[in-house]
Image (cartoon, grey):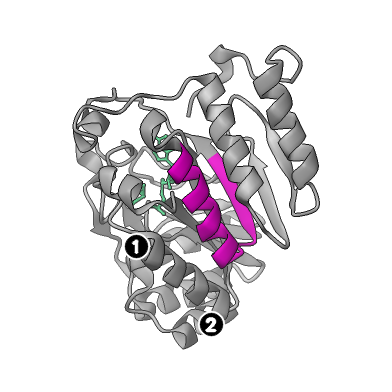
Amino acid sequence: MMIRLPYIEPVFRPPSEAHSLILQVTNGCSWNRCTFCEMYTQPQKKFRLKPQEKIEQELEAIARSGAPVRRVFLADGDAMVLSFRRLQGILLAIHRYLPGVQRVSSYCLPRNLKSKTIQELAELEQLGLRLFYVGCESGDDLVLERVNKGENFATSLAALQKIKAAGVKSSVMILNGMGGKRYSHQHAINSALLMNEAQPEYLSTLVVSFPAGVDRYQAGFGGEFEPLGQTGLFQEMFWLLDALELENTIFRSDHASNYLVLKGTLKRDKPRLLKTVSDALERPGAVNLRPEWMRGL
Ligand SMILES: C[S@@+](CC[C@H](N)C(=O)[O-])C[C@H]1O[C@@H](n2cnc3c(N)ncnc32)[C@H](O)[C@@H]1O
Ligand code: SF4
């Protein structure tokens, strides 16, 4: 069930929120400067907060429709930029209009949490905000600088630790291929180190892609970005997996943008996942790769 509201398109959500009510509480992304991300660059996606009355009108319409809603995803790109008070008001309204909702989730940039205390986050968790999707993309400071993420290892770790301390779950995204050939190894190793320190509940990797061309991205690398081919992407995935020391994290690398589909729980499935990647490296014909035409964001 996908309930359609008067969205300002395009609207993005994580694959695992396919059956959730997508509630647009902001339009666009307040940062909007990561050089790989074209999600909110169209003119109609200029960043704006949505007034509480409008959000409540939408919730009321959903309630009247009688559609059973169990999960809500707060869109767009970084709804957690809203103040604690505004988020509290939104969560209370969700609870009031849709009492059957069991989980609310949102994208979350590390810097969105700077002005929020652990106690405030714990309070939001009590009001239903259970999961944050955090686009760390990399644990390597140099790569993060090249792509203008505006975050680094330390800020990403601080946010992930705050989330954990508040009892909220985190689902981290790492971008395979983001450093190109030159930074591939350090990108993999430092991303693994960040995850090892943070121990998120979920980790997924996506292959970086350039739907609007690579020029903007190249500029950040001084024109020296060399994209990874399939083998390079697998090699980087091997380095990442090999260096991960996770206790109990659900790992997925099954986004439509990935060539190789990997799923498991780390650490339990680490040997199996490593074997699949090394098989893909050694004998590309032997593993189940997605055909080229099925890829795409
Ligand atoms: C809609 S964005 C919102 C995430 C949130 N603003 C953040 O930065 O944490 C969701 C994720 O899509 C992924 N993404 C964006 N552009 C991409 C691209 N060109 N190729 C692959 N993944 C991309 C990134 O991992 C990003 O964190
Ligand atoms: S990746 Fe996230 S923070 Fe960066 S521009 Fe896209 S939506 Fe904004």
Neighbor class of circle 1 (other Cα within 10 Å; few <14, some 14-19, many 20+) is: few
Residue found 37% across the figure and 37% down from its top: 10
* Residue 26 rendering spot, x and y as whole percentages: 33, 57
**Label 1, on which residue?**
54
Question: What residue is shown with label 2?
Answer: 122
What's the residue at 35%, 67% (across, down)? 112
Query: What segment carries the magenta color?
Result: 185-205
Q: What residue type is labelled 1?
A: Lys
Please say if 45 is above or below 213: below
Residue type at mark 2: give it. Ala
Residue at (23% x, 41% y) in the render: 44
Q: Distance between the residues labelled 2 and 1?
A: 26 Å
- Rendering coords of residue 53 (x, y %): 34, 68
Work out whether mark 2 precedes mark 1 in sequence or the reverse, and give the earlier one: 1
Q: Name the residue at 24% across, 29% down.
A: 218
Callout 2 secondary element: helix
Decide whether residue 40 is among the magenta residues.
no
Closer-to-camera residue (38/95)? 38
